[in-house]
Image (tube, rainbow, N blue to C red):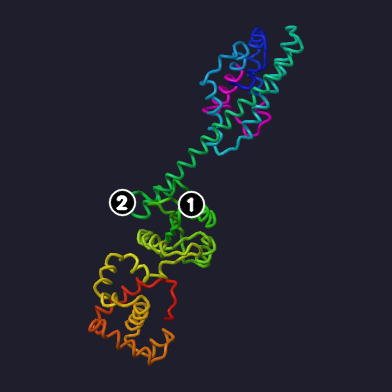
Amino acid sequence: MLIYMSISLPPTVADVLEPELPAIAAEILAVISHEVPEYMRPLEGAFGEAVRSGVDEALARFVTLVRDPEAADNAGRQVYVALGRAEQRAGRTLDALQAAYRVGARVAWRRFATASHAAGLDPKIVAGVAEAIFAYIDELSSESVEGYAQAASELAGDRERRREELVGALLGRAPGADQASLATDLGWRLPRTAAALACRPARLAGLARRLGPEALPAVVEGFGCVIFPDADGPGRRAAVTVAAAGREAASGPNGPLDHLPLSWRLATAALELADGTNLLTADDHLGALLVSQAAPVIERIAARRLAPLTELTPARRGRMAATALAYVQYVGNAAAMARDLHLHPQTVRYRIARLRELLGDQLDDPDARFELEAALRAERSPTSARRV
């Protein structure tokens, strides 16, 4: 129900006001085109038709509702919702439309007041007409605000859908998609090189905002994804690091656009290793990624290669596992192992002897040593101390 319908006006008032409508409509259009800068142009085409229709509908609807307050119809309401939508889609604020509404209210009130006095209406009724007009204009304005918000939401949703399409195409999820056309529709310039960044979806908007308008964000496979152009350019890595601070994010390598699928796979894998505060760069953790991405294989290797350690107590197993990892890393060099483990060389030699009793010929087989290192690296916590 309209706001002004609570204002009681005799239905006969409509008979006084209705003859004035054509002249009022013409004057409103003339004053709008003179006082509202955005409307200072010929009222032609779809724009002119929308303005004329809006003015005519507003006046006719007002008089109809004075005559019968229960005659409100959704079709009339949609005219002003549509006007608000049109302003948003034209890239304007609602300032011009609301200024036009104020002009219309002023002109209508002046004309209606003259007609009411001429008809000898009671001054209280004339005052009621004024109150009804301005309440009515407020209602029209609210309807246009609603339409404006609807269009803004739809536009945001449409842009989000097109961003998702473009990001999907860049990540190889839409073979044959026209990346150039999708980019043009979004007003985004296809770069020569780019990197994929991964983050949690809740952090995506903030990360993209910090990286600026050239960043291309979308949600992909439950991850936040940002395509960031020229990530290896001067100062670019530092910018990404600052933007990602506190956001638990990971970066794949920068490269030509056809390398983005690989960059994205590495970024999402690296995100699982992130500590929740700093940017993790996949290229700096390839060994850890290799281990983490081959978990079932590593588990089977550990079951085969490290079985002799399972019968030890937890403390002894930890010591021997650390010794075994140092052994394969330093190819049995006791001095280097001692420095790494912070132990006396004689202690290390003793442990090597014990290790040979447990693991035997595996320590001399290059393939076995490779598998042992993978299993031992996977078993070791990234934050555990090396001193045992």
Instruction: Read off the magenta span.
Output: 31-59
Residue at 67 percent across and 17 percent down: it is 7
Residue at 63 percent across and 13 percent down: it is 66
In the rendered structure, find residue 202 and report the number of the disc placed on it. Answer: 1
Residue position for label 2: 175
Side of 212 where 379 appears, left or right: left
Coordinates of residue 38 in the picture (x, y in percent): 62, 34
Q: Main secondary structure of the magenta part?
A: helix
Q: Nearest to the eye among marks 1 and 2: give it.
A: 1
Side of 306 where 285 appears, left or right: right
Between the C-alphas of marks 1 and 2, the distance is 28 Å
Please identify the residue farthest to the right as the structure is shown.
Answer: 123
Quadrant location of the C terminus in the rendered image: bottom left
User: Considering depth in this image, is 334 or 243 the residue closer to the camera?
Assistant: 334
Coordinates of residue 267 in the picture (x, y in percent): 40, 61
Question: Disc 1 or 2, which lies upstream in sequence?
Answer: 2
Q: Is residue 101 above or below residue 329?
A: above
Q: Is residue 223 magenta?
A: no
Please name the amino acid that badge 2 sits on.
Pro
* Label 1 element class: helix
Coordinates of residue 191 in the picture (x, y in percent): 44, 58
Residue at 46 percent across and 53 percent down: it is 216
Q: Is residue 20 above or below residue 381?
A: above
